[in-house]
Every structure is written in C-alpha cells, then in structure tokens.
Amino acid sequence: MDEQALLGLNPNADADFRQRALAYFEQLKISQDAWQVCAEALAQSIYSDDHIKFFCFQVLEHQIKFKYSELTEVQQQLIRETLITWLQAQMLNPQPEKTFIRNKAAQVFALLFVTEYLTKWPKFFFDILSVVDLNPRGVDMYLRILMAVDAELVDRDVVHTSEATRRNTLLKDTMREQCIPSLVESWYQILQNYQYNNSELTCQCLEVVGAYVSWIDLSLIANERFINMLLGHMSVEVLREEACDCLFEIVNKGMDPIDKTKLVESLCQVLQSAGLFSIDQEDDVDFLARFSKLVNGMGQALIASWTKLIKSGDMKSAQDTLQAIEAKVALMLQLLIHEDDDISSNIIGFCYDYLHILKQLSALSDQQKANVEAIMLAVMKKLTYDEEYNFENEGEDEAMFVEYRKQLKLLLDRLAQVSPELLLASVRRVFNTTLQNWQTTRFMEVEVAIRLLYMLAEALPVSHGAHFSGDVTKATALQDMMRTLVTSGVSAYQHTSVTLEFFETVVRYEKFFAVEPQHIPTVLMAFLDHRGLRHTSPKVRSRTAYLFSRFVKSLNKQMNPFIEDVLNRIQDLLELSPPENGYQALLSSDDQLFIYETAGVLIVNSEYSAERKQGLMRNLLTPLMEKFKVLLEKLMMAQDEDRQMALADCLNHAVGFASRTSKAFSNKQTVKQCGCSEVYLDCLQTFLPALSCPLQKEVLRSGVRTFLHRMIICLEEEVLPFIPSASEHMLKDCEAKDLQEFIPLINQITAKFKTQVSPFLQQMFMPLLHAIFEVLLLPAEENDQSAALEKQMLRRSYFAFLQTVTGSGMSEVIANQGAENVERVLFTVIQGAVDYPDPIAQKTCFIILSKLVELWGGKDGPVGFADFVYKHIVPACFLAPLKQTFDLADAQTVLALSECAVTLKTIHLKRGPECIQYLQQEYLPSLQVAPEIIQ
C-alpha cells in the first residue's frame, strides 16, 4: 500500500496528506484487486494504526456493497475467511480494538450476511458462534454484528427500495425458520453468564433482545425464564435502565388484544410485587425516566387493546381491560407530577389516551371524575416555570421546557373535551386566588395563572373569538377573569414573563373590549408606557410592538376617541434611527414596521374627514421623505463601504416604513377616498431617484421595488406615469437576481392594467428581453450550483412574463416586435418546452404555446405562423415527453404533460382535419412509427 498516502488518514495530518489519502481511497475503490491487499492486512494484523485498519474495512465494505458479484467463488471465499480470521484474532489480542473499528467490522459482517446468507453462507451465525463461544471479546463482536444485521433488515429510518424490502422479508423469514431459536438460546446463555460480572456485555445483550423482539416469535422471550431474569435485572443498578427498555420493546410488540392485556397485567403484577411501583422511594431520575417510558408503553398497549375489543364488540374483555387501565392511573399521576420534566413528559402519551377513553364514555364514575381533576391539577402545576429558567438568555434547557409546555397544552385541550365545566372552574379558582394577591406572589405562579386564562381560548374553542356571547356561564366567567386581569394592576408586575403573558392575553381576548370598552384606555396606556413599548427589556418591547398593532387593528371601531393621543405618544418611536454607531433606539427597524402600520390603521379607519386624514398621513410620512433626501445625498458622497451599507439600510427602512403604512387601506377605504393619493405620489417622487444611485444597488432597488408593488395596488393608474423611468433605471447593469425580482413587478402591471400599458410594454419588451438573454448567456463555472439555480429561476421568470403578456390578451405586444424578434422569442419558448429539464418552466411554455395557437393559429393569423406550428410546436409536444429527464413520477411533470396535451388539442381545434393529416402523412412517419400504430 502507498504508505505516504496512508499517513493522511490520521485526523491530525495536514490538508495535503489528507487530500492524498482521499484520492488514494477513491483509487483503491475502483482498482480490481486492492481489496485483497486490505483483506490480507486485516487477516495478518499487518498495521497497528487504528485509522489504517478502519480504512481497510472501508475498502472491503465498498467491495461487498457495490462490486461483490464481479468476484469469483474463490475470491468470495477469501473475504469470508478474512473476516473469520480477524474475528479469531480479536480474542487473542492483548488489547481490544477501538469501538469505532469494532462497529465498522460489524457493519461489514452484516453486509456480507445480507449478500450471502440465503445462498453461500447459511451457517453464518453458527460459524460466528463456534468461533466466539463465551469469550467476552468474541461475545462483544457477536452482539455488535447482531445489531448491525438488525439495522440492515429493519431500520425504520432508512427508506428501502421495494426490492430491498422483499429481500429483507425473505432474510427474516429464513432466520426465523433456521436460526432464531438458537440465537435466543445464545442470548440467554450470555445473560446468565455475564449478568453479575460484566454489565457492559449484559446491557449490550439486552439491547439486542429489545431490537429483535419486534420481529421474532414473542414466546421465545416472553416466557418465565427470560422474564424472571429481566426482572432480576430491574433491581441491579447498572442493568435496570437497559432491562426497562427491553421490557418496553416486549410490551410494544403487536399482538392479539386479549393476549396483550394478559402479558401487560402479568408484567405489572411482578413489577409491583418487586416494589418498583413505589416511586417516591426512588431517587435515580435516569432510571425513573426509562421506567416512566415503560409504564407509558404498558398504558398505551392496554388502551390499544381496549379500542380493538370495543370495535370487535367483545364488551366483557373490554371491561376487564378498562379496569386494568384504571388500576395504572394512580401510578401515571405520580409520574406526571414528578418534578423532573423528562419523567413527566414520558408518561403524557398514556395520560392523553386515557382522557380520550373517558371522552367516549357516556358517564364518568366518581373515581374517573377525581382522576380528571387530578390530571388537571398536575398539568397546572407542571406548566409553572422553575427558578432556574433563564429568560434573558434562553438555551437548550429552556427550549426543552417550551416543548414540554406544548405537550401539556395538548393535555389541557383534551381535558377541555372531557369536562369543559371542570376546566373552567379550576382555572377560574386558580386565577382569582392568584390575582387577588399578585403583589406578594412569586412570578411563576402569576405567569401560569394568566397563561391558563390564555390557554382557555383554544381549549374552549368558539368561532371568530366570540368568547363573550353564547353560553352564559362561560361568557360570564371569562368576562370576570378579563375584567380582573385589566383592573388588578398586574400589568405592572416586575417580571418579563408576566408582562408578556398579560399583553398576549389581552390581544387574544380583544372581543372583551367590545363588550366593556371602558377598559381600553387602561390597556392602551400599558402598551404605550414602561410596561410595554418602553419596557427595559428589548424582548418585551419587540413583542409588544407586534401585539399593539394587532390590538389596534382588531378594535379599530373603538379607537376613534384615542387616535390623536396615541399618535402623539408614539411620535418618538417612529423616528428613523440614524446610521450612526452606538445609537440605541428603543425599537428595531422590524418592530418599527408594526408601529407605522398601527399609525396607518388609526388614521385610515378614523371617522375624520378626508382632509384631516390627509393631514395626519402627511405628518406621518413627511419626516421620512425629508430624512430620505438627506441620507441619499450622504450616500452619494460616502467613501467607506461599511458607511455606505449603513446608509443604504437606513434608506431602505424609510421606504419600508412608508410601504407599511399603505397596508391600512382596503377596498372600502381606498387611498383616493381618504384623500391620501397626493402624499404617496410625493413619496414615489422622493424614493425613485434612489434607483439611479450607483452604490448599494441591490438594497435600494429591492426597497423601491417593494414600494412600487404596493403603490400599483393602492394608487392604481395614478402610478403609471412613474413606471417607464423606474423600469429603465432598474434594467441598467442588472444581474440575474435583479431581473428575477423586477419581472413580477412588470407582470403585476400587465395583469392589472392590461391594454392601458400596451404602448409601454411594446417599448420596453425587447430591452427587457435583451437584459434577460445577456444574463442567461453569461458563462458560468461548471460546478457553480447557485449560479445555475439563479439562471433557472430567471428562465422561469422570463416564461412567466410571456405567459402574463399572452394571457392578458396582449399578444400584439409580441407581434409588433418585428418578424426576427418574434421568431427569436418563439424559439426560446420551444427550447423551454423541450430542452431544459425543468417541469415548472416546461408547463409555462406549453401554456404560452397553446395561448398563441388559440390567438394566431386560425386562418387569419400572422403570416408563417401555421408553418411554425407544424415545424416546431407539434414536434415539441412529442419530443418533450420522450426525453429521458421527463419523469412522470414527479407531480410538476404530470402537469407539464397535461399542458402539452392541451397544446395539441388547441392545434387540432384551430387547424381541423389538416392537423390530423399532417400527423398521419408527415410527422409520425418521420419518427419511424409503424403505420398500424399511426392509424
């Protein structure tokens, strides 16, 4: 072997050596006999370096996986012998191999098993067992090989081809017939031999039993000698977690419902008599987490049995099973309420399914009602944050608690389905008790009380948030709690979690303020002062900005008396943050978007006259325009790249803010009706010069483009005079991405104004196409994925543009470009339909072609078009589906095929029998199609 290249296998080797080692590996993979060198190196233990041994196994693995059928019988025999020789050496070596080598060796054994077991090596396991006997190192390898075989046969994370699935089924069937009983016997011997003196091997063996139990005959494992041994392990500290998992797999095995109930019950009895159910005496949380998973498995298994028995009508057995379930509820509750969230989280599935059973029963017994209440109290307690939760810097633990809370929320929703009255009464009790003394109560209890009120909105669903009408009891209870929330002063609680929960809840129940509008000023003040938008925590300020805009939007009818006051109070929050370093604004620019939108909503939905609205809107937008002009001048002068970027961002924010205010307008309240057209036209005139700025083009163009999109919707035809010069600037020295984002703007104008913009489109049609073709023809590096993707997206945008033009009834825009240009455009569409393996673009191209045939394909169409139809469009309809890349398993391709068929149908409609004649006499014979098929 190339010793120099092998040096590069060491992870600490320098890059050149590593590169050389990689190249050497690729070379060995394709070499005819390199694997033999590696096999010899392994069999004779030539190398002591771990990385070289691993490398040799990798070469063998590649040979078995991809080139095994090329080997002769003798060579295949050599591979088998090499592995067995290597295995024998493991038991004699002074030191065991590193774990990563043992695992790789096990994978190679497993690959060979899959390849040879059914044909050449039926004694695979017996040969291995005869080598390893009960030698601890040998047993370790044997167990690793078993796990690797299981991974090959039943790994559910790997998507197997149907052929591999068939092969795996056959392998498992053959194993069940020929060797599984012997393997099970070997496991029993290993467990018996090592359970007290080698915990590592015992745990490995338990893992094997757990893995295989899902697909072998259960009676081989679920019998007295095995179960007794497993139960013995449950009281040995180093074995019990693995024993727990093994029992869980046994319980999880699919089987007849009555047998499953018996199995679970017999297990429970033994576990209980072994004292494992008294969990308050247990302080090993890792074990309890596994035990909780086991109890959850047993509970869910019984519930699955109950469901099957009910379906089959066996009421007697179903009743017995229900009693077995009820008997586990006390234990389930102990685990659910446990202070360790992992232990609690593992039992939630059982709890959820148990509530689902109760939901189906016609009446609940007193005990069942007590269980529901106990689950409810447990959920309320477990929803509470603990002291360690870090609100300012949330890490992995915090993320896990947030996930756990989501699980508890599902339980709460399920509780509401079982007993909505009980849930409402419990929440009301907790809420009222806590809020009466919130000043002296710890933050986590106040937070959870408000949180529960918030959660009721989803747990007790109503249409359109109408919580305060309909069911009187419920409406009264929620109304009372909301009144308490806004009048208790709890919004001043000095903890971010409570403050945020307050605002979230106020916004979720905004319909309350339609019923009791007298509380609106109180809540508005909370939003606007140090409790909300001016809070010391940026996280609270940011979330409040969003919630404030939702609050104002949802209550716009009730806002009229407060508009002027609110606009004055948010004045400082609307200031455009200057791009100077070190300036710390209260809100980020993203948060300010919400404040601008809120200001827009307040003005537009007010009951003021159009004149007054215009005045307020002008006050809102003039500072932005003035700042914009100053900043644009500064940008033109700026030398430093960082300074340029900061200024461009700031300019972009100004445009974005103006854009956002326009979201307040609607079909009922248009810009015209509110008298605001003039203000927005001024904005357009202020912002458009940024398009000709040579610096930071991408940022500036993107902002102005978005503003134009909004103005096309809001100002309608008043925007048209600005479009030609804006387009001209945007087409100057642009890249793929600029074009790709500019085309939707032109599509929007085309689709909205149709013939009104025909002269403009005719004028800019070829300049736009030239810009597109220029970018598409730029040479790109072969492996540059992102450049290839950009071109693909631009090509799609180009075809979408042609589709919009033809679909808006403006084919004259294309027709008037001169014969040569028209032909060039048509050929690009044919090329898009046939040559590029992009079904989305192909679909669009066929839509364009069928539209053009519909418009121009009749007797009075443009000169030469009928000829084009036969020479190019008809062949495209046949050639595209015949391409290797045309994959009918792909949904987009099926849509492309459907549009292709529509194109042919349209040709037939427009050209009549002549089309059939052309296919029969000219086109299909030219493809050498047999006459009988043509007919």
Image (cartoon, rainbow, N blue to C red):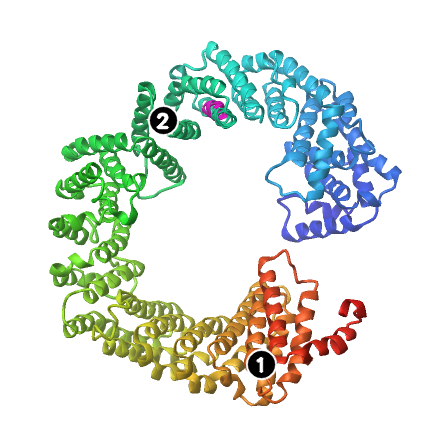
| Figure check: 828 above or below 64 | below
Q: Identify the residue at horizontal 13%, vertical 63% (top origin).
A: 564
Residue 558 horizontal side relative to residue 237, left or right: left
Residue 617 horizontal side relative to residue 284, left or right: left
Which residues lie in the magenta part? 292-302
| 295 magenta-colored | yes
The quarter of the displayed image where residue 491 is located: top left
| Figure check: 227 above or below 156 | above
- Dot placed on the residue nearer the N-terminal end, 2 or 1: 2
Amino acid at circle 1 = Val
Q: Quadrant of the N terminus?
A: top right
The quarter of the displayed image where residue 216 is located: top right
Judge by depth and name the residue closer to the eye, 633 or 435.
435
Residue 381 visible to the viewer = yes
Residue 44 visible to the viewer = no
Residue under circle 1? Answer: 825
Amino acid at circle 2 = Ser
Circles 2, 1 touching at the beta carbon (< 8 Å): no
**Residue 43 location, x and y as percent?**
80, 33
Judge by depth and name the residue closer to the eye, 459 or 183.
459
**Residue 183 location, x and y as percent?**
71, 21
Judge by depth and name the residue closer to the eye, 581 or 103.
103
Residue under circle 2? Answer: 362
| 161 magenta-colored | no
Q: Identify the residue at horizontal 33%, vertical 23% (top origin).
A: 364
The quarter of the displayed image where residue 897 is located: bottom right
Magenta segment main secondary structure: helix
**Residue 484 location, x and y as percent?**
15, 39
| Figure check: 785 above or below 317 | below
Q: CA distance from mark 2 to mark 1?
A: 71 Å
